[in-house]
């Protein structure tokens, strides 16, 4: 009799573990829709932050093209213009310390997260995107294929 009872307990334990694994997988799949892979499109709705885009590559209209791309994705880009110098690599300036949001902007453009700089300034926008000479490697230009943003 003792053998049957321990078998029943073992089966019950395995059943609980199985149900637990199923619940875990279900929740993991459900949460997966809030994350994005490296290839997934990023779009935002009603952003509570503002961005400006500055051309640091020296090529005419690049800041405007990046601005159009970000606006098409739902980002609130309120200004674009020229950076005060030419830079080799694109980067993002986070003026307010919202690193998660800066990472979303970086991901949308294909800028490495290591290129996010924190600046304690009273700048009028929350984020500044500076486009460097590497602009051609950014997502807007990789995906363009002759189409407009």
Image (cartoon, grey):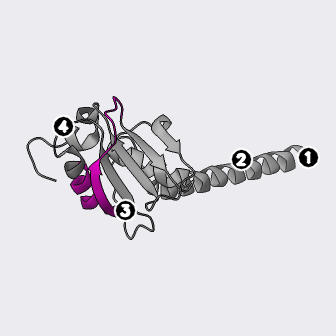
Residue 87 within the segment the image draws in magenta:
yes
Q: Can you identify the residue that label 4 sits on? A: 59
Question: Residue 73: in sight, yes or no?
Answer: no
**Total marks in image:** 4
**N-term-proximal mark, 3 vs 2:** 2
Question: Between residues 39 and 31, which one lies in front from this camera angle?
Answer: 39
**N-term-proximal mark, 4 vs 3:** 3
Q: Can you identify the residue that label 2 sits on? A: 14
Q: Are marks 4 and 1 in contact (CB under 8 Å)?
A: no
Q: Can you identify the residue that label 1 sits on? A: 2
Figure quadrant of residue 60: top left
Q: Residue furthest bottom?
A: 46
Instruction: From the image, state whether disc 3 or disc 2 is nearer to you.
Output: 3
Question: Between residues 82 and 27, which one lies in front from this camera angle?
Answer: 82
The residue sitting at 69% across, 52% down in the picture is 15
Q: Are marks 2 and 4 in contact (CB under 8 Å)?
A: no
**How dense is the environment of label 2, judged by Cα within 10 Å: few (below 14), some, or many (20 and up)?**
few
Residue 95 within the segment the image draws in magenta:
no
Instruction: From the image, state whether disc 2 or disc 4 is nearer to you.
Output: 4
Q: Residue 146: where, in percent of width, then height? A: 8, 43
- Left or right: residue 128 versus residue 146 is right
Question: Residue 66: in sight, yes or no?
Answer: yes
Alpha-carbon span between mark 4 and mark 1 = 82 Å
**N-term-proximal mark, 2 vs 4:** 2
The residue sitting at 17% across, 46% down in the picture is 61
């Amino acid at each position: 009799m003792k053998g049957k009872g321990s078998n029943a307990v073992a089966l019950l334990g395995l059943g609980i573990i199985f149900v637990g694994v199923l619940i875990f997988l279900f929740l993991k799949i459900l949460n997966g829709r809030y994350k994005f892979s490296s290839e997934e499109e990023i779009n935002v709705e009603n952003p509570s932050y503002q961005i400006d885009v500055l051309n640091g590559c020296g090529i005419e209209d690049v800041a405007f093209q990046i601005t159009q791309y970000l606006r098409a994705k739902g980002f609130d880009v309120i200004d674009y213009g020229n950076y005060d110098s030419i830079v080799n690599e694109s980067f993002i300036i986070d003026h307010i310390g919202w690193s998660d949001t800066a990472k979303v902007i970086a991901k949308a453009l294909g800028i490495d997260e290591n290129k996010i700089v924190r600046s304690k300034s009273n700048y009028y926008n929350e984020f500044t995107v500076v486009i460097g000479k590497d602009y051609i490697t950014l997502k807007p230009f990789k995906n363009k294929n002759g189409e407009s943003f």
